[in-house]
Image (spheres, rainbow, N blue to C red):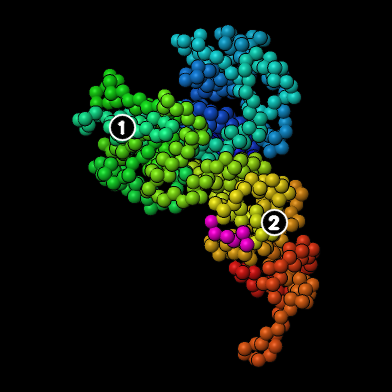
Amino acid sequence: MSKFSILVNVLDKIREESKASLYEATYLPNLSNAEAVNQARARAYIHLYLKVSFGLLEFSEREELLTDGTNDGGVDGFYIQPETRIIYFIQSKYRVTAANFETKLATAQELLAMDVNRILDGEGSDEKGVRYNPRIHKLQKAISDIDDIGRYKYKVVILANAPNLPNDKIKQLTGGFPTEIFDFERSYLELVFPIISGTFFKAVDLQIALDLSNKNAGTKISYEVTTNHHACEITVLFVPTAEIARIMRRYKNSLLAFNPRSYLELEGHKVNEAIRNTIVSNPSNEFALFNNGITVLSDETNINEKIGQRNKAQLILRNPQIINGGQTAYTLSRILDEIGDSGLDPFAGKEVLVKVITLTERDDVKATPEQKMQLIDRISTASNQQTPVITADKNSNDQDHIVIQKLVFDRYGILYERKRGEFADGIHEGYISPDLLVERNLFFRLYFAVIGDFKLAIRKRLFIKVENPLQVIGDTNVLDRLYFAFLCYSRLAKLIGRDARITRSRGIYLRLYALAIDCPKLIEEYPHAADKAVARLPKDWSAFIRASAKEHPELSRVKIDRKTGEERTYFDRSAWIAGVAFLDDAKNLFGKVNPEPGDVEDEEFLDPIY
């Protein structure tokens, strides 16, 4: 599945959000009408930008910001961001094929078509006297209704490959406003990848509503702690579970950047189900009694108990990060998704214990960013108790693995799962298939397989034992063969079963080494070539072993058949594999020896050793 295919799949899922709305006919036309489908995807592409860049989760909320259509003044959408006081004007040029999406450039004439200055001047029509459409007039009214409009700035966003012009020329074409270009590479890395990994919108100032109705001693307990380099304040309070569900639903994995794990949808299934049952099945607040709570890091924490509402208070966190309790928050958000507009409220009266750790610098000591991260890592490790933190989880946030993850997605469109559960949201939403994921240990097993180090390929807990992870991406040719080996592995796993027998089977990696030697030159040919290679593998492997036996008479051995007492000659495969002979034979013979007529498939094809 290519990156463009992933993008199209995401756009189609966004189109499905229009069901049962006034816009269903526009976004979900009959699939036989290819032009209408492509137009709907083009509109969904603007939705994708708004969803990822500004955290607008509701379809109707985003749709109101689209102006695309006849007489739109070259403006396809807008967004007014009060926090930064920036008004964004969006022009999008979605291309319907992968080749055009990645190569076709926006033209200078297309950029010149943006009438941003005329729209901001309050003009009701373009230079030819053609009146702008109602949505442009709605945009003008939204801007005119801003009380402190004098403090706002403007920015033009182009969702297309920029023309071959200097930045200052592009700025002139768009009316002299600062211009941000989302070309195909940036679209894949900053729009597509974040939405499938659930990291698309970061919380800066997070507002949480608190309930004071059953708290006779105030909302919180606070305690100050001094470390070597930081002054820390620990705030303990109970927060409505509905608030946790709401913020996790919006910010997803972006709240778990410092957490050693993302969503543990599979590994933590029993825990998740217990959390869910306590919320959904019990009308009383037993959740506060049974749950271990959530630990949050914050750069600044403020609580106001006097907000003009009876028994209400507000908690504000600056740059919050959940370092423990991600499963709890995640499961609560899923419950919120499930109930939708049903009118049910399983969260009513139920709260969860939250510990907020506010990190500030000491007046007498200047802490470095590295020292802050070391303290965060220690707090994270110490606070994770509900599910044990293994060493691999702790290593998953290392910068080397982030670099690898971005590179393999950019080059191949596959997802290196450095952190357990980080793509659970993308799978749940239907944006991606689990087949695109390459588990972190498997990734390095494939690397050592294609370079011929089979001892390391089957080593336990390989992920944490690789001293220099970046060696994997040092040689593009090796990395390409790793990708081809991954495609072959995925197909073999469907035949054999994706379990320990295959993931730590030396025989599988021997075969993958041989298959990856002569992978195609063009990456787009890899999937079809992997299909053919795996389909032929049993007979090719059988012929390869027979040819290798002929090449190495010195590896012939004699043993006595216990039943007949007769001598039997056999090929010593263990000795063959242990030396350099196997690697040389694979390069010289595999795939070049045709099975003899009537040749049977290798009877030991599925053998975990050979």
Q: Over which residues does the magenta segment extend?
A: 455-461
Q: CA distance from mark 2 to mark 1?
A: 55 Å
Question: Which amino acid lies under the numbered mark 1 shown in the image of this protein?
Answer: Tyr
Q: Was residue 301 drawn as part of the magenta stretch in this picture?
A: no
Residue under label 2: 451
Q: Secondary structure at mark 2?
A: loop
Is 426 rendered above or below residue 560? above
Q: Which mark is residue 223?
A: 1
Where residue 16 appears, x then y in whole percent?
Answer: 51, 38
21 horizontally vs 352: left or right: right
Where residue 84 appears, x then y in whole percent?
Answer: 50, 19
Residue 337 seen: no
95 horizontally vs 62: left or right: right
Residue 384, picture quadrant:
top left
* Circle 1 crowding by C-alpha within 10 Å: few under 14, some 14–19, many from 20: few
* Circle 2 crowding by C-alpha within 10 Å: few under 14, some 14–19, many from 20: some
Q: Residue at x 47, y 45 (%)?
A: 261
Comparing 300 with 417, the one in front is 300
Residue 548, picture quadrant:
bottom right
